[in-house]
Image (spheres, rainbow, N blue to C red):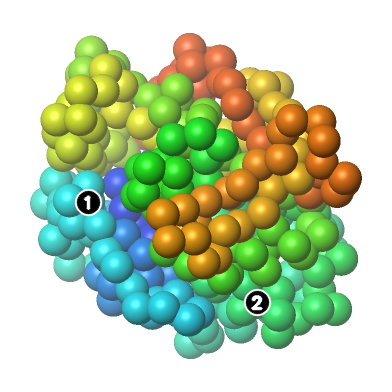
Amino acid sequence: MSKTPIIIDCDPGHDDAIAILMAAASDKLDIKGITIVGGNQTLEKCLNNTLKFLSHLDLHIPVAAGAEGPLLRGLTVAPYAHGDSGMDGPQLPPATQKPVEMNAVQLMEKIVRESEQKVTLCPMGPLTNIAIFLRANPDLIEKIDKISLMGGTTLIGNRTPTSEFNIWEDPEAADIVFRSGIPLFMQGLDVTYQAGVNDDEIAQIRAIGNKYSTFVADLLDFFSKYHRNLGRMYTPLHDPCAVAYVIDPDMFTTEDHYVEIDMDGELTLGTTVTHNFGRCTHAPNCTVSLGIDREKFVKLLFDSLEILGRGGRYA
Ligand code: BDR
Ligand code: CA
């Protein structure tokens, strides 16, 4: 079976890092590149976090820096969830790896142009890099197989009452992506709040006892504090849902809808407005995940960390 070539666009970020590890462990995926966008923290911090953990974990994947901030707005970072570094918790030595000598859009273009197979995009930060790439390379749109993104919500937001952080951060970029015509699979808060781990499971992750699981447990010990303070039983693993969907879509329950981005609502900026009342005259542009088999998802995470501990891939 040939592997699915993917590009991960992200702003690490605790859950971003876990998503990269889940993808790195999968024999179904071939991570062709990791592109970084300013989001959870500044571009510089997100890039440094990525290079540090890839170096520490001996994972060698091309990394490129992208946009410092949204297309039309200033960057608003999220230290309340991810700490001042953007990935507080694990104590890692300085990075030994360096980014490639291309920017994010150039790396995406090279990968997609040179790939014999269509490429899957997995964005898990603001959609700025992806929007610039699509606008700059309209001829490559047909070479994108699908986009499985973490972002949006049909109900309750985490940045405003109705909007999710990644979409809210750069709504104009999200609008470009949602109108792109590329098959779109939205892993929004509807599903990502179901896809989490509890404190026992974090302890079980630590007990796996290799450097990958120790890193993830250190991430989750920090990340869970924010979510526990909000009264949540599970620490959500938002971004790994974008990867898990590509690995095993059967784990998810979905509905197809026409989704539009609110770009100027005073109270609802960045809302993924989901036309779901059967009166919409537009054809669906998005497959929206609404449910997940949590046990299967957690098993996939555990298995991924054990596989990485046995070594071999991206060495
Ligand atoms: C999203 O925002 C970030 O804080 C997470 O990494 C995730 O991508 C959740 O709203
Ligand atoms: Ca993220």
Q: Is residue 10 visible?
A: no
Labelled disc at residue 6: none
Instruction: Please state which amino acid type lies under the numbered disc 1.
Output: His
The residue located at (77%, 35%) in the rendering is: 256
- Which secondary structure lies at badge 1? helix
Instruction: Please state which amino acid type lies under the numbered disc 2.
Output: Phe
The residue located at (18%, 37%) in the rendering is: 226
Say few, some or many: other residues with alpha carbon within 10 Å of mark 1 (under 14 / 14 to 19 / 20 or more): many
Look at the image and tell me in which quarter the N terminus lies: top right
Tell which circle, 2 or 1, labels the residue nearer the N-terminal end: 1
Q: Tell me how far mark 2 sits from mark 1, CA to CA.
A: 27 Å
Asked whether mark 1 lies closer than 8 Å to ligand 1, one says: yes
Q: Picture coordinates of residue 245 (x, y %)?
A: 63, 35
Nearest the viewer among 313 and 46 is: 46
- Which secondary structure lies at badge 2? helix
In the image: residue 297, left or right of residue 289: left
Q: Quadrant of residue 174?
A: bottom right
Q: Picture coordinates of residue 291 (x, y %)?
A: 58, 21
Q: Is residue 91 visible?
A: yes
Q: Which residue is under mark 2? A: 133
Q: Which residue is under mark 1? A: 82
Q: Picture coordinates of residue 272 (x, y %)?
A: 58, 49
